[in-house]
Image: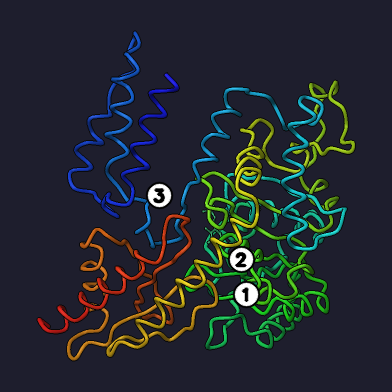
């Protein structure tokens, strides 16, 4: 069975470069064929795998080199091997003494990530299912550390460029949506720290309790990086918890350019990372680091009589005490195995390559008449629009996105900035290399030229 599943994966991955970047033709019809009752008796593996393979064929090709929409995922094969092993071994790592050395593997992964951000020995972290859950635990940790039990006066600050998961996390943590403040940004889409200070002063005067500043280390829209040093200064002056959302950009800390852009990140109280973005892992691996690990544990730990036989945290942490989850998969191996196999330098080089490819795309479009690129890339997102000779620019740019995506060689997405429609290409898959970006440049240029001619 394992050999057949491996055959399926190998042919799927081998076909990725030539597979369409998106393909939804007839996809709903195919999906409907999977609405069926559970069988009373089992089928042969070949038949079942054929259905998995057919189901995987349609959709956005998130694992392929042409996928530049949203935040690409990638999916290192070594991580699939790690999951195969960990699900097969099925050891429990939520409390350390159930599998001390395996729990240590996960703790070691957390330590590697803490070291990347120069976090002290008392820092702790958890691997989550993604950045959304990491942001959620960060807000809960900050709330429990800084606010009384009756916390509804607590207010949260972040630029209008924050990821929606921060607002969602605030609501899930019990705050009304109005307690999340959208601070204005400077023209480069970084938080305006002066405006932040004024909002905080007004809120305090109105009897509210500012407690959390969430800053971007690479926004999803354009890769904007908030001035983290100035944010840390403001947070210190105002006694706020500084949370940095590095779900998309955080791993660029491995590169010299990223480290410069993130100066001051080591002063954050907590950092969200998504190994399933910047470490090219498959979906399902996020991470939260907390500089004072005690605060993470105090926010999540609850006693239970039926767990009384388990050892308390010792030199190896009990992850269940620092996380909303008790039972879960062994995510540590999914990070550890690829790093052990490839080495950190391979990740660093791949991220440097993405930064270079971003310059290439940005400069090529900026040099093409008609294209507007109002924001120089700070990470690996190129945001652009085209100024048509005539007609409604928004309708034109929507049509441009469709035409680019019809190529099926690249797949881009769009967003709104300052109420204007912009296209964006995000380059962060380990499978995206120079040839595909050169092809993307040609596709984007000729789609715009053709549309502008027929307008
Ligand atoms: C992707 C992303 C998130 C959400 O992470 P998930 O892993 O999708 O839950 C949060 N913040 C930023 C900046 C992101 O790019």
- The image quadrant of residue 410 is bottom left
Q: Is residue 144 left or right of residue 217?
A: right
Quadrant location of the N terminus? top left
> Residue placed at 63% from the left, 33% from the top?
328
Disc 1 to disc 3, how far (Cα)? 26 Å
Q: State which tag comes first along the sequence, 2 or 3.
A: 3
Q: Is residue 86 left or right of residue 95?
A: left
4 is higher (above) or lower (below) than 103: above
- Toward the viewer: 331 or 242? 331
**Quick one: SS at disc 1?**
helix
- Toward the viewer: 449 or 389? 449
Q: Position of residue 99 (x, y in %)?
A: 76, 26
Quadrant location of the C terminus? bottom left
- The image quadrant of residue 411 is bottom left
CB at disc 1 and ligand 1 closer than 8 Å:
no
Disc 2 to disc 1, how far (Cα)? 8 Å
Q: Quarter of the picture for ligand 1?
A: bottom right
Around disc 3, counting alpha carbons within 10 Å, would you say few (fewer than 14), some (14 to 19), or many (20 or more)? many
Q: Could you tell me if the residues under marks 2 and 1 are in contact, i.e. CB atoms within 8 Å?
A: yes
- Residue at which label 2 appears: 252
- Residue at which label 3 appears: 63
Q: Position of residue 369 (x, y in %)?
A: 28, 90
Q: Residue 257 carries which label?
A: 1
Q: Could you tell me if the residues under marks 1 and 3 are in contact, i.e. CB atoms within 8 Å?
A: no
Disc 2 to disc 3, how far (Cα)? 20 Å
362 is higher (above) or lower (below) than 43: below
């Amino acid at each position: 069975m394992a050999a057949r599943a491996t055959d399926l994966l190998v042919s799927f991955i081998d076909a990725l470069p030539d597979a369409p970047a998106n393909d939804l033709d007839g996809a709903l019809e195919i999906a409907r064929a999977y609405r069926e009752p559970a069988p009373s008796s089992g089928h042969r593996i070949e038949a079942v795998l054929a259905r998995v393979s057919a189901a995987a064929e349609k959709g956005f090709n998130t694992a392929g080199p042409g996928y530049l929409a949203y935040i690409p995922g990638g999916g290192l094969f070594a991580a699939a091997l790690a999951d195969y092993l960990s699900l097969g071994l099925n050891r429990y790592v939520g409390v350390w003494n159930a599998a001390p050395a395996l729990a240590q593997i996960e703790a070691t992964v957390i330590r590697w990530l803490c070291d990347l951000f120069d976090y002290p020995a008392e820092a702790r972290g958890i691997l989550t299912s993604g950045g959304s859950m990491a942001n959620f635990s960060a807000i809960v940790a900050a709330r429990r550390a800084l606010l009384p039990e009756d916390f509804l006066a607590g207010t949260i600050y972040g630029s209008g460029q924050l990821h929606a998961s921060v607002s969602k996390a605030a609501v899930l943590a019990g705050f009304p949506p109005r307690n999340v403040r959208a601070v204005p940004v400077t023209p480069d889409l970084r938080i305006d720290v002066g405006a932040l200070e004024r909002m905080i002063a007004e809120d305090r005067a109105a009897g509210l309790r500012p407690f959390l500043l969430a800053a971007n280390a690479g926004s999803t829209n354009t890769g904007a990086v908030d001035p983290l040093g100035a944010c840390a200064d403001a947070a210190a002056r105002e006694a706020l918890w500084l949370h940095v959302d590095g779900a998309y950009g955080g791993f660029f800390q491995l590169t010299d350019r990223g480290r410069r852009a993130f100066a001051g990140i080591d002063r954050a109280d907590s950092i969200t990372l998504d190994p399933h973005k910047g470490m090219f892992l498959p979906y399902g691996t996020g991470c939260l680091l907390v500089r004072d690990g005690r605060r993470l544990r105090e926010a999540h730990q609850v006693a239970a009589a039926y767990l009384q036989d388990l050892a308390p945290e010792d030199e190896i942490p009990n992850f269940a005490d620092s996380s909303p989850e008790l039972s879960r998969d062994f995510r540590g191996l999914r990070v550890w195995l690829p790093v052990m196999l490839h080495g950190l330098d391979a990740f660093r080089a791949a991220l440097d390559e993405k930064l270079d490819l971003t310059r290439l795309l940005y400069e090529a479009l900026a040099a093409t008449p008609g294209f507007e690129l109002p924001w120089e890339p700070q990470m690996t997102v190129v945001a652009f629009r085209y100024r048509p000779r005539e007609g409604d620019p928004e309708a034109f740019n929507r049509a441009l996105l469709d035409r680019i995506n019809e190529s099926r060689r690249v797949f881009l997405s769009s967003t709104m900035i300052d109420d204007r429609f912009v296209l964006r290409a995000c380059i962060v898959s380990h499978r995206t290399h120079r040839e595909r970006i050169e092809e993307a440049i040609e596709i984007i240029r000729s789609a715009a030229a053709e549309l502008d001619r027929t307008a």
